[in-house]
Image (cartoon, rainbow, N blue to C red):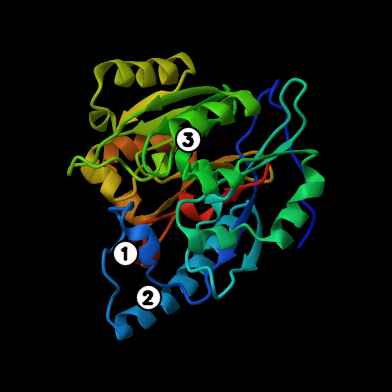
Amino acid sequence: MPPVTPVGRFDSVIPAASHVLMIEPVQFRFNPETAASNSFQVQHPPDPADAARLADLAVAQHRVFRDLLVTHGVRVTACRSLETTPDAPFCNNWFSTHPARGNRPPTLALYPLLAPIRRRERREDLVAWLGPAYPRTIDFSSHEHDARYLESTGSLCIDHEHGVAYAALSPRTDRELAEEWARQAGYELIAFTALDGDGLPYYHTNVMMFVGHGVAAVVLESIVDAVERQRVEAALAQAGHKIVPITRAQAAAYCGNCLALSTDSGRPVLAMSSTAFGAFSTAERTVLESAAQILHADLTAFEQLAGGSARCLIAELF
């Protein structure tokens, strides 16, 4: 793999990432260890024929999505997952990278994952590849032994430009650990509880909100505490984001699981699935398209089998 080159500085305007990591699936399949905390995921394994079809479809859809990003000027570094890591394509959950900020150099952060099988995704070869570009590493992974979890940019919706991270608390997002991350990383943390239509916490923040290119889509109706909801709205407004309130039904169609990226020439793009694209209203798409070019692809294999979509498949390399 080519070396990682950090871009931008936090104390100037931070563009969205123009370089990303994607992990191609190998034997993509149902993971029973994650089903209990992810209501988006199918709760029982499909029959063998359907499982084989979805595994093949996941590879094909992942390649089309990767090529779509590359064609539009996003630099993609890709590698294959291990056969022992069924959820490895969701590579944004075990690490994150951060541009320099103040006296903090470019930083690599490693995270604790709830499902034991997913901890294998934190591969030594990938950490070694990332390391040289990031002089500082903060490692929270040992908290797995204390049953405290924080699943990177699944748990944290990060506004790098304004130094704010949003966290919807869940079994995978521990408040105290998120607060410790914020202290070490130098971000303001805004934590809240967000419930889906069944009254369950969203398993990851990145399925109920995204921020980037001056827009923020968020399921405000899911933040049941009025004070918490007002704090989220106020922080987004103070940062100058145009708020696009989405519904729980739209979150279930992955409208919150989008990612702001930049091309190699600095042009803003917004990656999402075709499911999400179809679930936004015409008026909402107009708002999003005024901020960035929308790039969408069919990711139904990932959505139907594992409860993750476009944002989950991309790890930013700042």
Is residue 283 rendered to the left or right of residue 23?
left
Asked if residue 153 is positioned above or below residue 228 in the image, the reply reads below
* Quarter that holds the N terminus: bottom right
- Sequence-wise, the earlier of marks 2 and 1 is 2
Q: Residue placed at 23% from the left, 26% from the top? A: 224
What amino acid is found at the position of numbered circle 3 in the picture?
Cys
x, y (%) of residue 73?
A: 63, 51
x, y (%) of residue 136?
A: 76, 37
Give the image quarter of residue 204.
top left
Confirm whether residue 155 shows in the render: yes
Q: Residues within 10 Å of mark 2 (few under 14, many from 20)?
A: many
Q: Residues within 10 Å of mark 1 (few under 14, many from 20)?
A: some
Local SS, label 2: helix
Circle 2/circle 1 CB separation < 8 Å: yes
Give the image quarter of residue 281.
top left
Q: Which residue carries the number 1 mark?
A: 304
Q: Which residue carries the number 2 mark?
A: 54
What amino acid is found at the position of numbered circle 2 in the picture?
Leu
